[in-house]
Amino acid sequence: MTATLGNLYPVIELIANQNKPERSFLNERYTDLQNWQSEARKRLMELLRYRPPQVPLAPEIKEVAQHDGVIRESLTFSSAPGVRVPAYLLKPARQTRPAPGIVALHDHGGFYTYGKEKLVQVEHEASDLTLFKETYYSGRSYATELARLGFVVVVIDAFYFGERRIDFSAIDPDLLARMQSRISTLTESLSAYHEQCSAFEEVVARHIFAAGATWLGIMSHDDRMSVDYLLTRPEVDPERIGCLGLSMGGHRNNYLLATDPRIKAAVTIGWMTNWRDLLPMHVRSHSWAQFVPGLAANFELSDVVSIGMPAAFFAQECARDELFTYEGMQSACNKIERNYAKAGLPERFQSRFYDVPHQFNRAMQQDAFDWLARWLM
């Protein structure tokens, strides 16, 4: 078999064969959904390894703007001691009663300069951001579109993106000099910055692991705090909370669904596969932020999202997505379908393959919006 690790791959394959997802709901020893969920969610939280002390949200609204029927609030809230999370809150301008709340989760895309702005319509949008949206979102700021449709939407900057991106002027100058030598052939400053951010992910991940946490644990915690913030808003019906995201946003979506029982409906776009299918050739395609050490011996990703049952879950797959194998995407969807069937909830899961590369185009957006409206409106 051709594999990224060549002659070393047999060792990896041996390890994978010894680490079966023993806590899958499909294991015959699990017969009660609630008991399995309780055990599985507890174990998943242990694996994510990030449970900072609780702090008051203490939200601060910095700016309010209105455009084309949508009110946009720029704000920050606390997610941990000393940690302020930048966010946008979007709501219909003519809202008269509590509406469904949505956590919209931005992607990775190797594009670190922006986070929440990838999904939100802002004035005087930079040309590079416009091009990014055209490539992955058919030119649409879909979180703003959701607000136009009657949802109240929160979008945060994930750790390492947007306003939370790294300031290279503050790091070890010798390390920075070595990194810059690796990208000396790049001429555009923005491209160079993104290349630096990508190379530095390894250093960030090492620090997070050494400190005793996981990168995905940090992001997942902040995403749950986004739900906490939504529930402070009188415009939001606390019984109707949903989430969605593309790519890394989809992966964040998987873990938000699994770890927060307040989520009632979710859509993952372009990040549903079984990890084992990534091992030969596709692990290198994914950010350090995507990995949870020890997960494989407990769950497949299809098991992770199933912890969120009975929430209604829609997996949108890009059939020509080079980040995954088609077989891995299909096997994951098949396993989720079996989990929902075992729980007696077959109507609450849907998957669909679109004949497109990695993206969330307008047709896919419409299907996702319809799914959220079906279960939350």
Image (cartoon, rainbow, N blue to C red):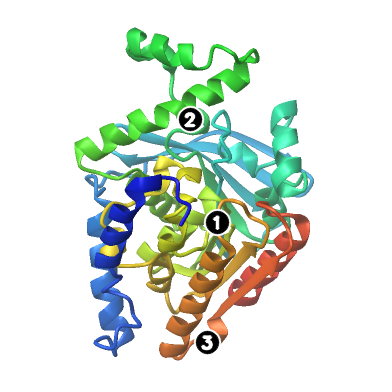
Q: Amino acid at mark 2?
A: Ser
The label nearer to you, 2 versus 1, is 1
Q: Name the residue carrying label 2.
A: 198
Nearest the camera: 148 or 131?
Answer: 131
Q: Nearer the viewer, residue 301 or 223?
A: 301
Where disc 1 sits, the SS reads: loop
Callout 2–callout 3 Cβ contact below 8 Å: no
Mark 3, residues whose alpha carbon is within 10 Å: few (<14), some, or many (≥20)? some
Q: Position of residue 56 (x, y in %)?
A: 31, 44
Residue 346 tag number = 3
Mark 1 / mark 3, whichever is N-terminal: 1
The residue shown at (60%, 56%) is: 152
Q: Visible in this render: residue 81? A: no
What's the distance in space between the residues labelled 2 and 3, CA to CA?
40 Å
Q: Relative to residue 347, is residue 137 depicted above or below?
A: above
Q: Amino acid at mark 3?
A: Pro
Q: Is residue 282 left or right of residue 67?
A: left
The residue depicted at 42 percent of the width and 48 percent of the height is 290
Q: CA distance from mark 1 to mark 3?
A: 25 Å
Secondary structure of residue under mark 2: helix
Of the image marks 2 and 3, the number of the one nearer the N terminus: 2
Q: In the picture, which quadrant includes the C terminus?
A: bottom right
**Answer yes or no: do the residues labelled 1 and 3 have beta carbons within 8 Å?**
no
Residue matched to label 1: 324
Looking at the picture, does residue 200 appear above or below residue 22? above
What residue appears at the point 71 percent right and 68 percent down from the top-left corner? 367
Percent coordinates x, y for residue 43 in the rendering: 23, 65
Helix, strand or loop status at disc 3:
helix
- Horizontal and vertical percent for residue 212? 20, 42
Quadrant location of residue 108? top right
